[in-house]
Amino acid sequence: MSSFSSLGLSQPLLKAIQQLGFEQPSPIQELAIPALLAREGDAVALAQTGTGKTAAFGLPLLQHLETPQGFVQALILAPTRELAQQITTQLDQLARYAHGLEVLTVFGGAPIGPQAKTARQNPAIIVATPGRLIDLMERRAVKLDQLRFLVLDEADEMLNMGFQEELERILTETPAEKATWLFSATMPAAVRKIAKRYLREPQELHSSTGAEVNTDIAHHYALVHQRQKGAALGRFIDSAPQMRGLVFCRTKRETQELAEALLKRRYRADALHGDLSQPQRDRVMKRFREQELQVLVATDVAARGIDVNDLTHVFHHNLPDDAAFYTHRSGRTARAGKKGLSVVLLDRRDEYKLKRMAKQLGISFQEAAVPSAEDIKKEHLLRWHEEVAAMAPPMGISEDMWRAARERLDHLTREELLARLMQRELDQLSIQEVDDAPQPRKGNKGPKGFKGGKGPRGKKGSYADKWRKGPGKNQGGSRGKGGQKSFRKGKK
Ligand code: ADP
Ligand code: MG
């Protein structure tokens, strides 16, 4: 693997990269940066979500632009306001030591007047959502007649969102001699069609086939009835209190319902899907970023804009139809060399889908039990012990209170007292009922896993043990028992 300094970037850019804490270029950056620096023509770059595509086009772009010229030199199109703003933030950071290039962000859902006014001042770079850019073009607030670079970022998503007409219009109404760089996470037919029609002999920069394996991700599946998936998810959360996770659903409705069920049970969860207004989205994302939310339930599309790097878990409430989406989903965890867990909640009826996906992607899925009530209690008490041990000596207990306590409790031994306190603590927990996973079919003895290309055959073990010892290490342990019911009182 090479370093940023060997890619041909200028000193001011290298300095900014260093300050951002990027140590090594990601595969798409390693591929795209030298290629886009060397040749100004068109390009199609394909790499999965979260692999640093912004810097992969941003760095060569900034280097090509050099200085402000008094006209718009580059236009970057992104599907949503959130993504557009993220691009601008990143470009500002990367350009920190370079040539005072101005970056303007324009997007719908905000008053057009101020955006038009700034656009008329001809910033060097405009980052825009397609609809708003067209509006500004129609008002003649943006002049693109000297445009040198057009970047279509998250092209697949822009087309998914119905921006095809806008894209085609922008592609045709900008100078023919510009360089067009198309960046995408996937290459569906609609994207290929745009590339074929509007790009001239683009260089192909593919860092992924959508099927490569991130070895820092452990892939697990837990057998659970469809209707008990919410409860099972609750158990996973309870058994790993430090978890920070994304739960993927296939539809907006599924997303909303699951988030509501979790909220009702006082989990710090919320939903992210396409029906939310922009302010609602912003608020959910802010709460997730600031760790006020522990789990975010999202559709595949909505999760695109999430820029959060320290996720410990990705859950699949249902498997996606397309195997490539599984890779995108699970790739949200195990970023930057960290370990991560991808857990499929699998109804027995969908086993065949998982088998097919394992084969297609070359991934081994390991069976893991839904955490048992025992796992959760153990985990809860361990935490409680640690918290009590770490407490500062209590100061607020008066002599009177002490006297009263002694009168009532002195007959208990230390053991007895501690046992009662622990029991009280456990009574606070409410652990949802989850049936024992259906028994494996005949001839299928004990632990198993779905094997894709590589890796040892999976063994089943206690989920909580596995997580505590770090995902990926297949530790033995007890099987989930389930079936314990109680009620959760407001747990902070
Ligand atoms: P994509 O557009 O491919 O989904 P982004 O460009 O949004 O990915 O980058 C995802 C995250 O990774 C961002 O937080 C970004 O700052 C970070 N990042 C990008 N390149 C690197 C790198 N070389 N090293 C470490 N982090 C990086
Ligand atoms: Mg991106």
Image (cartoon, helix red, strand yellow):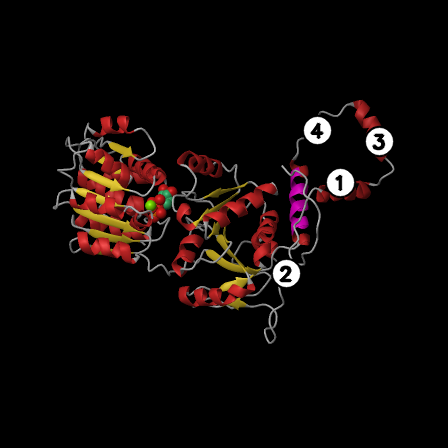
The answer to whether residue 120 of the structure is visible from this angle is yes
Residue at the disc numbered 4: 394
Mark 1–mark 3 distance (CA, rounded to whole Å): 16 Å
Residue found 74% across the figure and 41% down from its top:
424
Mark 2–mark 3 distance (CA, rounded to whole Å): 42 Å
Circle 4: residue type: Pro
Q: Which mark lies nearer to you, 4 or 2?
A: 2
Q: Which x, y percent locates residue 266?
A: 60, 40
Q: Which region is colored magenta?
A: 376-387
Mark 1–mark 4 distance (CA, rounded to whole Å): 17 Å
Q: Does 444 sit above or below residue 158?
A: below
Lower sequence index among marks 4 and 2:
4
Q: Which x, y percent locates residue 31?
A: 26, 53
Q: Residues within 10 Å of mark 4 (few under 14, many from 20)?
A: few
Lower sequence index among marks 2 and 1:
1
Label 2 sits on a secondary structure element that is loop
Circle 3: residue type: Arg
Label 4 sits on a secondary structure element that is loop
Q: Is mark 3 within 8 Å of ligand 1?
A: no
The quarter of the picture showing ligand 2? top left
Residue 477: mark: 2
Lower sequence index among marks 2 and 3:
3
Q: Is residue 416 left or right of residue 376?
A: right
